[in-house]
Amino acid sequence: IGGNGPEGPRLDDGVLVGRGRVFAATSNPGKFEEFRSLLAGLSVEVLSLADQPPVVFPEEGTEYEANAVAKARAVAEALGEWALADDSGLEVDALGGAPGPLSARYGGPGLDDSGRVVRLLGALEDFPQAQARGARFVCVVALVGPGGEQAIARGECAGRILASVRGDEGFGYDPVFQPQGFEGSMAELGPEVKDQISHRARAFAELAPALAEIPVASD
């Protein structure tokens, strides 16, 4: 993959070269923006599915890797493009590692992010603010190419579950998750800090070499 100098993509005869592109296999606006932020330092363009024909995603199962690969493959096959997907979850010690890969569906289909947080706090009411509230965010990210190429990476962020919601940045379980070594919740840290320590940031960092190998877009 040529064309990248120390300052990134270059112009040859008025045409931008040295920059691949990948579609984010998600309909979640918050996650899409996080993808873009995490990949801002790479010579790869992250594109949304918003202006593309609808993609039918497979039903999610109970394994991070299988879910991530299936979502990325669905987009890669539908669009004939490189696709990037993740599957992430919150694993709580007191709940035996639940909700895990089912985090986005925790409590049933009628709940939004806030409802799932309330459901989680209710499940932990009888547990002390100590070891039982230990938790970790887990993320597995999959990159799939139009020819079936595949790369996978995993990242984790350890911490604990707070007794109540704190902060209004982030999404999902961020307001009740306190990362190890920090005083505030993930939702109080701001995107700059989160993009350095989050489970997704760590997974993307592991995947960076594969992302750098995405061929330059031809149109």
Image (tube, rainbow, N blue to C red):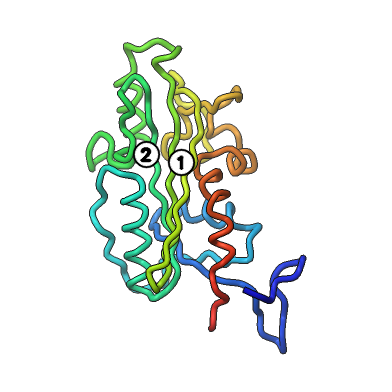
Q: Quadrant of residue 163?
A: top left
Decide if residue 81 is on the left or right side of residue 73.
right
At x 23%, y 53%, the residue is 59
In the rendered structure, are the residues bearing label 1 and label 2 in contact, judged by CB atoms less than 8 Å apart?
Answer: yes
At x 52%, y 54%, the residue is 35
Query: For mark 1, what is the residue?
Result: 171
Decide if residue 186 is on the left or right side of residue 118.
right
- Residue 92 is tagged as none
How many residues crowd around disc 2 within 10 Å: few (fewer than 14), some, or many (20 or more)?
some
Q: Is residue 19 above or below residue 162?
A: below
Front-most of residues 13 and 1: 1
Q: Secondary structure at mark 2?
A: helix
Residue 209, percent from left and from top:
58, 58
Query: For mark 2, what is the residue?
Result: 113
- Which quadrant: the N terminus? bottom right
Q: Earlier in the sequence, mark 1 or mark 2?
A: 2
